[in-house]
Amino acid sequence: MRNHVQVAVIGGGVVGASVLYHLTKAGWKDVLLIERAELTSGSTWHAAGGMHTVNGDPNVAKLQQYTIELYKEIEQISGVSCGVHITGGLMLAGTPERVDWLRMAQARGRYLGMDLQLITPAEARNMYPLLDEKHFLGAIYDPIEGHVDPYGVTHAYAKSAQIGGAEVVRQNRVLDTKQRADGTWDVITEKGTVHAEHVVNAGGLWAREVGRFVGLELPILAMEHQYFITEDLPELKGQKELLHVIDFEAEIYMRQERQGMLLGTYERAGVPWSPRTTPWDFGQDLLPNDLERIAPSVSVAFEHFPRLESAGIKKVVNGPFTFAPDGNPLVGPVKGLKNYWVACGVMAGFSQGGGVGLSLANWMVEGDPGADIWAMDVARYGDWANRPYTNAKVRENYSRRFRIRFPNEELEAARPLRTTPIYEKLQAENAVFGDYCTLEHPLWFAPKGSPAREDATFRRSNAHPHVAGECRAVREGCGLIEISNYGKFEITGPKAAEWLSKIMACKVPAVGRIALSPMLNERGRLIGDFTMCRVSEDRFFVVGTYAAEVFYLRWFEKHLPPSGVSVRPCAMEYLGLSVAGPKSRDVLQKLVDHDLSTAAFPFMSFAQLDVGMIPALVGRVSFTGEMGYEIWVTSEYLRSLYDLLHEAGNGHGLRNFGGRALNSLRLEKSFGNWAREFRPIYGPYEAGLGRFVHLDKGEFIGRAAAAAEKASGGVRKLVTLAVDARDADAIGDEPIWHGDKVVGWVTSGGYGHCVGKSIALGYVYNAVANEISGFAVELMGEKRAAVRSAEALYDPKGLRMRA
Ligand SMILES: Cc1cc2nc3c(=O)[nH]c(=O)nc-3n(C[C@H](O)[C@H](O)[C@H](O)COP(=O)(O)OP(=O)(O)OC[C@H]3O[C@@H](n4cnc5c(N)ncnc54)[C@H](O)[C@@H]3O)c2cc1C
């Protein structure tokens, strides 16, 4: 075993092997994989090997496509067969909602280059004689589905990597990882210590334990998972291999295995395995069967596929594999641990392993994953995702694997967990709450006396008329919304302004002013958007998306100078309320001595003010498009502030509003949101943020690339579309058509209650970005005509928020 390497990859499952291969492919040859036992000794060896391209996140779907295409390449390099069977697959719908879901999946596939065909139950039956069509309403046929041999794939990756210069050491457990003062690592193994510049934790079933070597508690949990293989069915003999099948109503997946059928299920009563510590002596072991647990699904499957009932069971496999709370992998560099990377929590190693390896290798070698992998980034979880939380959410996610997640649906596990001091007050107002990184926040307010509950649907819900009322209250009078669920950073020090100017693309504001502040990476792509408020010469209050707090902190830390700047996350220390609407000034003026007139406190002003007796940071800024103020206070004051504002707002018709109304109001203004309109695949000019990028202010990260984007015009533009929708608005990820071509995708959508239009924001290619008509958005399988609006649909000149 080498004693000094550039990278030590811990774990020889399909994921570690893929990382190793991709590192060599990207040019890093001095790389070592260390495996405790034999390759595949974690969850990989007993996997069913199924693979498919469909994923809820289009960016993850692209990486799944990449993974499936990769098998030819590693077979060619290594000479090892991956045992690829591309059978094609069917996803079967038994309810109208699932048919809607299939239509949406098919639509999304259009801009991803997927060839998904919507077919009737009779057509499905022709393709798959084992099913009884009377239980189904429709299906999707995907020609690119199938299965592989898990052992073959892992060895093909490892061998290809070895041919590329990597070393693989088996039967050698990593006992510890210790960081040296220079940020490199001592990897302590049973066979001696290796000095590595970088460490990759691809420990799969033991990734948690490997993480604990460095004090890291990764949010992953293994669940028991069962499938069985039937005795041979004589009618399959000599026939073309059957398709893969997902039957959502039975909650099963199924494929042919030799002459029998392999049937697996994600049962509702899923059982975690080793919730605290994974035993090191667990090898290529299986867990005891528990067919009773999967009986409810299996009995539905027997109705839907009657031939199976009489087929005996030849073999049962019950094995554990790991999940993150949302079911997506955990990939990337870990904040606070230099040169420490993870690639774990991969629940679909044979669809995703290649994409995970590619992204991580790009990230390590090029400094950037090369694709938008926000959905897999380990930084999407903060400290709030601790072990008990992970346990609750993973179980919920597992049990819902084959259930629809409606766009307006709030899941119940681990709730309510974090609440702010006005939670009970909002509850008393009949707030319907949402969960955002475990923090409860109001979505909308149901009428008094009716249940505070929203129907889960793809269409407009029971919230629709009530949200309309909230929107009107803001546009016509004054609304109050809790905005505690934003991320906040206090950035201080003599070099704070200089540093912010380098890290952000905007001009640093003067004391008492606010700047909208895009943050770019070296490639000039958007990796953040903030409101930067300057409190004093060397103190800034910076507000951004809370879900990206760790993502931002990781970036900040990477670029912090050794001294002179301090960054302090203070999301839960400062909570906030915003008042918005033409009467908002009148309400707030009653409570502060400071002159709030536009002359004295214009749009984008910021000050430390006493609101009544409450010390606060107050900014005149608005996400609703109306005159508005954001008021930030330390948490102990929030309750008093809420009461005070309501008292002051009494005569002005002040009314609570929630996140649903805010979304409608911001869509009317064409204001983008992080993780929707603003993501690392877009440049600031494409995203309509060019006016906040100050190329002439001096050097900043991403400047050269942003200048090039400005000169070239980028490849696409964010546009606003008014859609001729019926009862369902765009949500996001729908294709945008122009004529008979798909020219882009929706990033977010909803109903603009005050303009009376269904609105979609999305990106289209430059070639059509200046067209007005001829657009359509595909909603629930229907192309609904859309008209591009060259400017925001509401108050395009922004006069109302500046009034
Ligand atoms: C019953 C079942 C069916 C499945 N079916 C499918 C399917 O159809 N399709 C699909 O895509 N996925 C399926 N999966 C999931 C799939 O198995 C996982 O996605 C995949 O195995 C994850 O691979 P990994 O490399 O992350 O982890 P693992 O396979 O667990 O590999 C981790 C490796 O790291 C090694 N290791 C850990 N700690 C150390 C240490 N300290 N020192 C040295 N080595 C260490 C372990 O020995 C192990 O070999 C299934 C899983 C199960 C259990």
Image (cartoon, rainbow, N blue to C red):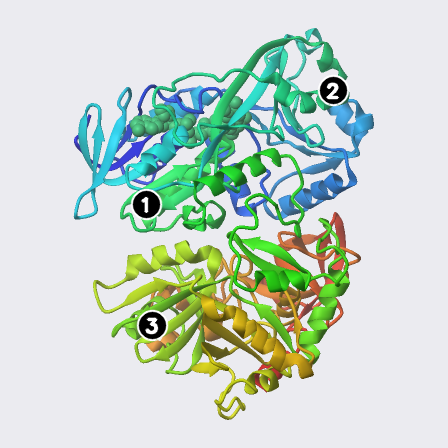
Q: Residue at x 27, y 72 (%)?
A: 493
Checking the image for residue 149, the label placed there is none
Q: Report the amino acid beneath label 2.
A: Phe
> Looking at the picture, does residue 126 appear above or below residue 209?
above
Q: Write the residue at 34% across / 63% down.
A: 568
Q: Which residue is mark 3?
A: 501
Query: Mark 1 or mark 2, which has the lower sequence index?
Result: 2
Image quadrant in which you'd find residue 271: top right
Alpha-carbon distance for marks 1 and 2? Answer: 47 Å
Q: Is residue 255 visible?
A: no
Disc 2 designates what residue? 305
Q: CA distance from mark 2 to mark 3?
A: 63 Å
Other-residue count near label 2 (Cα within 10 Å), few / some / many at <14 / 14–19 / ≥20 = some
- Chain-order first, disc 3 or disc 1: 1
Question: In which quadrant of the rendered view does residue 100 lie?
Answer: top right
x and y percentages locating residue 570 in the rendered image: 40, 63
Query: Residue 724, can we see it?
Result: yes
Does dot 1 land on a helix, a strand or a loop? Answer: helix
Dot in front, 1 or 2: 2
- State ligand 1's quadrant: top left
Q: 367 or 35, which is in the foreground?
A: 35
Along the viewing direction, whichever of 671 and 604 lies nearer the viewer:
604
Which x, y percent locates residue 178? 21, 39
Q: Secondary structure at mark 3?
A: helix
Mark 2 or 3, nearer chain start: 2
Q: Is residue 160 left or right of residue 771?
A: left
Secondary structure beneath label 2: loop
Q: Residues within 10 Å of mark 3 (few under 14, many from 20)?
A: many
- Give the amino acid type for the residue marked by disc 1 in the picture: Met
| The N terminus lies in quadrant | top left
Residue that mark 1 sits on? 364
- Tell me the residue at 66%/16% (across/down): 240
